[in-house]
Image (cartoon, grey):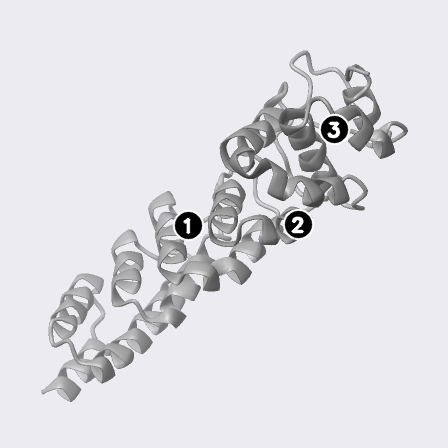
């Protein structure tokens, strides 16, 4: 009976009927059947991409197969997909635990639209799963040639929110990581390091950021008035 149900599922054109049959198979609670169903779900999703429906994405997540969870996480890199489908990718990240970090790093490295929050969500998840030990790799993965928010001080505000809401509780633990990133070739990593050092260690910021005093790299989204800003000008007013 199980074999017939699996065979039938593979031939159904209607997604609704397919998902109803997959749900029926799930109720059998048979590991071999679930693995076979996972293969059918993956094939269905790959064929549908980029028109993967929220219902299909939810079924992939519900199956729980690690390959399906990794595939869901990978889908978050595609801004053509609906927010609900990409949201299932981050639900998959929660189920994968630390094993999600490689996939999350790929999200960070993806050049997404400036108003797309997937990179910020991936950064949040990496921090929650890997802590200070994953911070350097995460910030270095952010694309220097990517699109970032340029309106007013929006990029600065987003970074400062990450510093305050994620790193502040582990300020001493992340201090050596941030200090090292001050000299990183990736200007995005340097921007995070600079902003977080100013927020977390105000008394030491001037000394810690000394390597940036001559850094004329432009900082988009760093001034409320929209004035051109560089690393050097951003730290010019730090207290001695």
* SS of the residue under disc 3: loop
Residue lying furthest left in this view?
1
Marks 2, 1: nearer the viewer: 2
Q: Which picture quadrant has residue 45? A: bottom left
User: Does label 3 or label 1 sit earlier along the sequence?
Assistant: 1
Disc tally is 3
Q: Which mark is residue 219?
A: 3
Identify residue for label 2. 136
Which residue bears the numbered disc 1?
81
Which residue: 57% across, 55% down? 105
Mark 2 and mark 1 residues within 8 Å of each other at the beta carbon: no
Residue 49 drawn above or below residue 174: below
Q: Position of residue 174 (x, y in %)?
A: 63, 42
- Residue 91 in view of the camera: yes
Q: Position of residue 129 (x, y in %)?
A: 47, 53
Q: Which quadrant, please, contains the N terminus? A: bottom left
Query: What's the distance in space between the residues labelled 2 and 3, CA to CA?
Result: 20 Å
Query: Which badge, 2 or 3, is on the more N-terminal residue?
Result: 2
Q: Nearer the viewer, residue 186 or 146?
A: 186
On screen, 103 above or below 119? below
Residue in the foreground of this view, choosing between 96 and 40:
96
Can the viewer see residue 49 in this picture?
Answer: no
Q: Which residue is rendered at x = 57% and y = 32% of the image?
A: 163
Left or right: where 102 falls relative to 233:
left
**Does label 2 or label 1 sit earlier along the sequence?**
1
């Amino acid at each position: 009976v199980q074999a017939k149900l699996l065979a039938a599922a593979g031939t159904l054109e209607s997604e609704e009927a397919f998902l109803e049959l997959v749900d029926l198979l799930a109720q059998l609670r048979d590991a071999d059947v679930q693995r076979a169903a996972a293969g059918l779900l993956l094939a269905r999703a790959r064929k549908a991409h980029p028109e993967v429906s929220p219902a299909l994405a939810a079924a992939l997540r519900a199956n729980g197969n690690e390959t399906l969870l990794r595939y869901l996480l990978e889908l978050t890199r595609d801004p053509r997909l609906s927010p609900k489908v990409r949201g299932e990718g981050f639900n998959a990240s929660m189920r994968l635990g630390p094993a999600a970090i490689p996939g999350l790093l790929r999200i960070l490295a993806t050049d997404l639209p400036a108003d797309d929050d997937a990179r910020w969500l991936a950064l949040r998840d990496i921090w929650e799963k890997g802590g200070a030990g994953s911070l350097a790799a995460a910030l270095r993965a952010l694309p220097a040639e990517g699109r970032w928010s340029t309106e007013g001080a929006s990029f600065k505000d987003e970074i400062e929110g990450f510093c305050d809401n994620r790193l502040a509780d582990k300020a001493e633990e992340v201090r050596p990581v941030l200090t090292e990133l001050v000299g990183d070739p990736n200007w995005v990593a340097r921007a995070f390091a600079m902003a977080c050092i100013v927020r977390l260690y105000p008394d030491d910021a001037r000394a810690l950021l000394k390597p940036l005093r001559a850094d004329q790299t432009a900082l988009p989204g760093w001034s409320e008035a929209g004035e051109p800003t560089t690393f050097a000008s951003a730290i010019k007013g730090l207290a001695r």
